Image (spheres, rainbow, N blue to C red):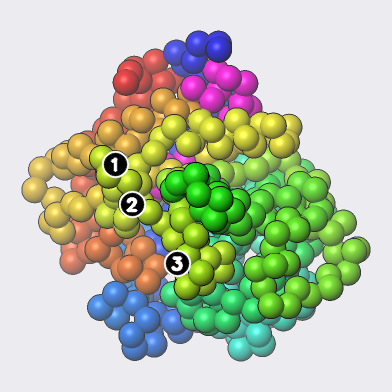
Amino acid sequence: MPDAPSRFPVGFLWGAATSAYQIEGSPLADGAGPSNWHVFAHTPGRTFRGQTADVACDHYRRWREDIALMRGLELNAYRFSVAWARVLPQGRGRINPAGLAFYGRLVDALLESGLAPSLTLHHWDLPAALEERGGWLNPDAAGWFADYASVVARALGDRVAMWATLNEPWVIMDAGYVHGVHAPGRRAPAEAPRVAHNLLRAHGAGVQALRAETARPVGIVLNIEPKLAATDDPADVAAAARADAYMNRWFLEGLLRGRYPEELRALFCAWPGFPAGDFDLIRAPIDWLGLNYYTRGVVRHDPTAPVPHAAHVRQSGSVYTDLGWEVWPRALTDTLLRLKQQTDLPLYITENGAAFPDPEVATADPLPDPLRVDYLRAHLLAAREAIGQGADLRGYFVWSLLDNCEWAAGYAKRFGIVHVDHATQRRTLKSSGAFYRDVIASDGATLTA
Ligand code: IFM
């Protein structure tokens, strides 16, 4: 096996990632429309302690300060998302120039600061007006998304270094329509195939729309979680294969091969007859693939669990994050190599990071967060190992720049490499931020186990 290189490749993107809903705040400012997440979070009982992203990290007003933070971290790239309803308050039709202008200013300032803007068009916050029309269940959603993509790309075009259509479409489907813990809060597994298909059609239509407006590389961001059987009992082995088909292969094979895993049909009481032509759209050629990697899943067969009828089994001796995710860096190497076998596309780790408990008020600067430092070190080493074994990995974006609104879990789950005191909005570097800055400064040469 070749040795891992000591440095990351020349031109490697060192970034941090965020999303609009999670950091911006001011959701209705300057003519923006509400999103489905705004509605969901304002519905009693949906989020932890009723927390909303009305203020979040106040990034909509503090973005200059946040860019200065990124410069201090020596990042050369920043991944963010656009709030669809800021740009198109009704989701389609009338454009809100003030909303577009916000992202124009942000992109210009990033470029002036030497940060490559990596823009994701949809990171879960669908305009509420479109949710009222059926959201991702409506086959028209692909056209809505393509129109939105055209509007943003026409305004920002080649100023954006790389474009992503969707972030983690699997989560939109699974958390939003199977478990009902994310917007729109539906517990209707039978709807999942149509939602997934419409998301993938939207991606394909979005790729075509972007191509018409920009020559910059276009991709998509998937969360992939390797599934392992808890025992060698054939029922558990089958559960792991089902879970892999459901969470990983559904979207990967759809995008790369234009087909869905056969196993999925048995998981749903009815499987829609999707038109063959849709798959030509879904597999529209892309230029890069984004991997969000956090953990692996060790599972056992559980017929009482919702699709895919597989329950996670806690591993004794493992470290778990504050969200209950096992820390398992080796599977990042495996996943990058698995992707290498399936595609020649350049790969980016578009999210990787961990929620660990940090105090609400920073008591030191930098604020010690040794568990997160360990997590980042181990995963960066795993990424470097994959490069040594031939993975075409072009960049790494830590999740996340700031402690932000972790969707339905609110503000208690902290992922930032920069601490945010949500009462004062004061930002304080964490040790993980300082560690990451030093790794970047040495192109990874300072990384040791
Ligand atoms: O906060 C999320 C992000 O929005 C999408 N990927 C996973 C992160 C941690 O849960």
Structural distance between the alpha carbons of marks 3 and 1: 32 Å
Q: Quarter of the image containing the N terminus?
A: top right
Q: Are marks 1 and 2 in contact (CB under 8 Å)?
A: yes
Comes first in the chain, label 2 or label 3: 3
The relative height of residue 415 versus residue 378 in the rendered view (above or below) is below
Residue of label 1: 318
- Residue 235 shows up from this direction: yes
Looking at the image, the residue that sits furthest to the front is: 233
Residue of label 3: 21
Relative side of 254 to 9, left or right: right
Q: Position of residue 278 (x, y in %)?
A: 85, 64
Q: Nearer the viewer, mark 3 or mark 1?
A: 1
Read off the magenta span: 385-399
Residue of label 2: 314
Quarter of the figure with residue 68: top left
Query: What's under tag 3, amino acid-wise?
Result: Tyr
Mark 2 Cβ inside 8 Å of ligand 1: no
